[in-house]
Amino acid sequence: MTDLYTLAPSQIVMYTTQFCFDCHRAKKFFEVNDIPYLNVSLEGDHEATEFVMQVNHGSRSVPTIIFPDGSLLVEPGWEELKQKWLSGIWWGRRQVESRIWQKLEYGDARTTTHQTAQPAQSGNHQV
């Protein structure tokens, strides 16, 4: 099964363009947190462009990120990506909990503000 052009990929698939600030921010989030993803550039890929427009009701919005659970984020900010990651939806909660305390000392990559993760209370993750 291919992970391209589907709402049910086996891994995170991010549709991007080369000169998109939001795309670079999302890539940085995944890289800082060692989260594997498949990057698909819309430039020169008509099928990728058509797929993005289909899932975004005619808009060519990037980044469009498709997760293995079938959910998607469109043009997410750092906080929205962090909340998705903390939810454990696409990883499985145990793997997230074991990695989160090591990785989430990073704030928004655009600022010098850093946050340190604190233990969650009653299953709710707070950073």
Image (cartoon, helix red, strand yellow):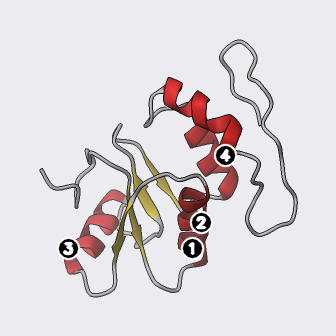
Which dot, 4 or 2, sits closer to the camera? 4
Discs 3/2, front: 2
Q: Residue 117: which quarter of the image?
A: top right
Give amino acid for label 2: Lys
Q: In this figure, which residue is indicated by the disc labeled 3?
A: 47
Q: Quadrant of the C terminus?
A: top right
Q: Which of marks 3 and 4 precedes in the sequence?
A: 3
Badge nearest the viewer, 3 or 1: 1
Q: Residues within 10 Å of mark 2 (few under 14, many from 20)?
A: some
What type is the residue that disc 1 sits on? His
Graded by Cα atoms within 10 Å as few (under 14), some (14 to 19) or many (20 or more), the crowding at tag 3 reads few
Label 4 or label 1, whichever lies nearer to me, is: 4
Residue carrying label 1: 24
Q: Secondary structure at mark 3?
A: helix
Q: Residue at 59% of width from left, 50% of height from top?
A: 81
User: Residue 37 location in percent, x, y?
Assistant: 40, 57
The answer to whether the residue labelled 1 contacts the one labelled 2, judged by CB atoms less than 8 Å apart, is yes
Q: Position of residue 7 (x, y in %)?
A: 27, 48
Q: Secondary structure at mark 1?
A: helix
State left or right for residue 101 relative to residue 63.
right
Q: Which mark is residue 103?
A: 4
Compared with 125, 84 (above or below) is below
Badge 2 is on which residue? 28
N-terminal of the pair, mark 4 or mark 2, is 2
Would you call the spot at circle 4 few (<14 residues within 10 Å), some (14-19), or many (20 or more)? some
